[in-house]
Image: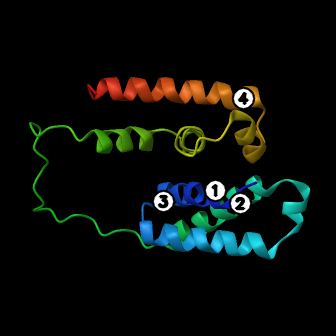
Amino acid sequence: MDLSAQYDKIYRYCCFHLRDPQLAEDLTQETFLRFYRQASYQEQGKALAYLYTIARNLCLDAVRRRRPEAPLPDDHPAPDPYAPIDRTLALRQALDTLPADLRELLLLRYVNELSVGDIAVLTGLSRYAVYRRLRAGLADLKHLLREEEL
Protein backbone atom coordinates (compact mmCIF):
# COMPACT_ATOMS: atom_id res chain seq x y z
CA MET A 1 0.00 0.00 0.00
CA ASP A 2 1.27 3.46 -0.91
CA LEU A 3 1.25 5.35 2.38
CA SER A 4 2.16 8.69 0.84
CA ALA A 5 -1.20 8.66 -0.95
CA GLN A 6 -2.94 8.02 2.39
CA TYR A 7 -1.41 11.04 4.11
CA ASP A 8 -3.80 13.56 2.52
CA LYS A 9 -6.76 11.30 3.21
CA ILE A 10 -5.86 10.93 6.87
CA TYR A 11 -5.38 14.70 7.07
CA ARG A 12 -8.85 15.31 5.57
CA TYR A 13 -10.30 12.75 7.97
CA CYS A 14 -8.74 14.54 10.96
CA CYS A 15 -9.68 17.98 9.63
CA PHE A 16 -13.28 16.88 9.17
CA HIS A 17 -13.51 15.69 12.76
CA LEU A 18 -11.62 18.57 14.37
CA ARG A 19 -12.35 21.55 12.10
CA ASP A 20 -8.91 22.85 12.97
CA PRO A 21 -6.35 22.53 10.14
CA GLN A 22 -3.30 23.01 12.37
CA LEU A 23 -4.40 20.43 14.92
CA ALA A 24 -5.40 18.07 12.08
CA GLU A 25 -1.89 18.39 10.63
CA ASP A 26 -0.34 17.61 14.01
CA LEU A 27 -2.56 14.59 14.55
CA THR A 28 -1.92 13.32 11.02
CA GLN A 29 1.80 13.38 11.71
CA GLU A 30 1.26 11.66 15.06
CA THR A 31 -0.86 9.02 13.32
CA PHE A 32 1.96 8.12 10.95
CA LEU A 33 4.57 8.18 13.72
CA ARG A 34 2.53 5.71 15.75
CA PHE A 35 1.86 3.62 12.66
CA TYR A 36 5.56 3.28 11.82
CA ARG A 37 6.41 2.32 15.40
CA GLN A 38 4.12 -0.72 15.17
CA ALA A 39 5.10 -3.03 12.30
CA SER A 40 2.79 -5.99 13.01
CA TYR A 41 -0.25 -4.48 11.31
CA GLN A 42 1.77 -3.75 8.19
CA GLU A 43 2.81 -7.39 8.02
CA GLN A 44 -0.78 -8.62 8.47
CA GLY A 45 -2.08 -6.51 5.58
CA LYS A 46 -4.28 -4.36 7.83
CA ALA A 47 -2.35 -1.14 7.39
CA LEU A 48 -5.27 0.99 6.18
CA ALA A 49 -7.56 -0.06 9.02
CA TYR A 50 -4.79 0.57 11.54
CA LEU A 51 -4.10 4.06 10.15
CA TYR A 52 -7.74 5.10 10.44
CA THR A 53 -8.05 3.55 13.91
CA ILE A 54 -5.07 5.57 15.14
CA ALA A 55 -6.41 8.76 13.54
CA ARG A 56 -9.92 8.21 14.97
CA ASN A 57 -8.57 7.65 18.48
CA LEU A 58 -6.33 10.72 18.32
CA CYS A 59 -9.23 12.87 17.08
CA LEU A 60 -11.52 11.60 19.84
CA ASP A 61 -8.88 12.38 22.46
CA ALA A 62 -8.39 15.88 21.03
CA VAL A 63 -12.13 16.58 21.04
CA ARG A 64 -12.40 15.43 24.66
CA ARG A 65 -9.55 17.74 25.70
CA ARG A 66 -10.94 20.74 23.85
CA ARG A 67 -12.46 23.52 25.92
CA PRO A 68 -16.02 24.52 25.06
CA GLU A 69 -16.26 27.71 23.02
CA ALA A 70 -17.58 30.80 24.70
CA PRO A 71 -21.17 31.69 23.72
CA LEU A 72 -21.78 34.69 21.48
CA PRO A 73 -22.68 37.89 23.31
CA ASP A 74 -26.33 38.91 23.37
CA ASP A 75 -25.63 41.99 21.24
CA HIS A 76 -24.30 39.85 18.37
CA PRO A 77 -26.25 40.76 15.18
CA ALA A 78 -28.63 38.19 13.74
CA PRO A 79 -27.79 36.76 10.31
CA ASP A 80 -29.38 38.50 7.34
CA PRO A 81 -32.21 36.25 6.05
CA TYR A 82 -31.88 37.81 2.58
CA ALA A 83 -28.15 37.20 2.22
CA PRO A 84 -27.14 34.68 -0.46
CA ILE A 85 -26.87 31.11 0.79
CA ASP A 86 -23.33 29.86 1.32
CA ARG A 87 -23.49 26.36 -0.20
CA THR A 88 -20.48 25.06 1.74
CA LEU A 89 -21.94 26.26 5.02
CA ALA A 90 -25.34 24.79 4.16
CA LEU A 91 -23.73 21.44 3.31
CA ARG A 92 -21.75 21.50 6.57
CA GLN A 93 -24.90 22.27 8.56
CA ALA A 94 -26.82 19.50 6.81
CA LEU A 95 -23.99 17.04 7.50
CA ASP A 96 -23.92 18.11 11.14
CA THR A 97 -27.54 17.03 11.57
CA LEU A 98 -26.69 13.47 10.50
CA PRO A 99 -25.50 10.94 13.09
CA ALA A 100 -21.71 10.88 13.58
CA ASP A 101 -21.30 7.32 12.29
CA LEU A 102 -23.16 8.18 9.09
CA ARG A 103 -21.08 11.35 8.58
CA GLU A 104 -17.96 9.25 8.94
CA LEU A 105 -19.14 6.74 6.33
CA LEU A 106 -19.91 9.56 3.89
CA LEU A 107 -16.49 11.11 4.52
CA LEU A 108 -14.66 7.84 3.96
CA ARG A 109 -16.58 7.05 0.77
CA TYR A 110 -16.98 10.39 -0.97
CA VAL A 111 -14.18 12.57 0.37
CA ASN A 112 -11.44 10.00 0.90
CA GLU A 113 -12.72 7.84 -1.97
CA LEU A 114 -12.39 4.52 -0.16
CA SER A 115 -14.14 1.52 -1.63
CA VAL A 116 -17.16 0.00 0.10
CA GLY A 117 -15.00 -3.05 0.84
CA ASP A 118 -12.30 -0.97 2.54
CA ILE A 119 -14.94 0.87 4.58
CA ALA A 120 -16.42 -2.47 5.63
CA VAL A 121 -13.02 -3.59 6.89
CA LEU A 122 -12.46 -0.30 8.72
CA THR A 123 -15.84 -0.23 10.42
CA GLY A 124 -16.45 -3.93 10.97
CA LEU A 125 -19.72 -3.74 9.02
CA SER A 126 -20.68 -5.97 6.12
CA ARG A 127 -20.33 -4.56 2.63
CA TYR A 128 -24.10 -4.64 2.26
CA ALA A 129 -24.59 -2.72 5.54
CA VAL A 130 -22.10 -0.07 4.42
CA TYR A 131 -23.81 0.26 1.03
CA ARG A 132 -27.26 0.45 2.65
CA ARG A 133 -26.17 3.09 5.19
CA LEU A 134 -24.47 5.17 2.50
CA ARG A 135 -27.64 5.16 0.39
CA ALA A 136 -29.75 6.15 3.39
CA GLY A 137 -27.27 8.89 4.33
CA LEU A 138 -27.28 10.35 0.84
CA ALA A 139 -31.09 10.30 0.79
CA ASP A 140 -31.19 12.10 4.15
CA LEU A 141 -28.63 14.63 2.96
CA LYS A 142 -30.57 15.32 -0.26
CA HIS A 143 -33.76 15.79 1.75
CA LEU A 144 -32.06 18.24 4.13
CA LEU A 145 -30.53 20.23 1.26
CA ARG A 146 -33.86 20.36 -0.53
CA GLU A 147 -35.35 21.92 2.60
CA GLU A 148 -32.61 24.56 2.39
CA GLU A 149 -33.48 25.00 -1.34
CA LEU A 150 -29.99 24.13 -2.59
Q: Going by the image, does 112 lie left or right of 74?
A: right
Nearest the viewer among 31 and 78 is 31
Badge nearest the viewer, 1 or 3: 1
- Mark 1 surroundings: few (<14), some (14-19) or many (≥20) residues within 10 A: some
Nearest the viewer among 144 and 121 is 121
Badge nearest the viewer, 1 or 4: 1
Nearest the viewer among 126 and 61 is 126
Q: Going by the image, does 128 lie left or right of 21?
A: right
Residue placed at 75% from the left, 36% from the top?
117
Q: CA–CA distance between discs 1 and 4?
A: 24 Å
Q: Can you identify the residue that label 4 sits on?
A: 129
Q: Can you identify the residue that label 3 sits on?
A: 15
Residue 100: image location, x then y, percent? 55, 46
Q: What amino acid does circle 1 point to? A: Gln
Q: CA–CA distance between discs 4 and 2?
A: 22 Å
Query: Disc 1, disc 4: CB below 8 Å?
Result: no
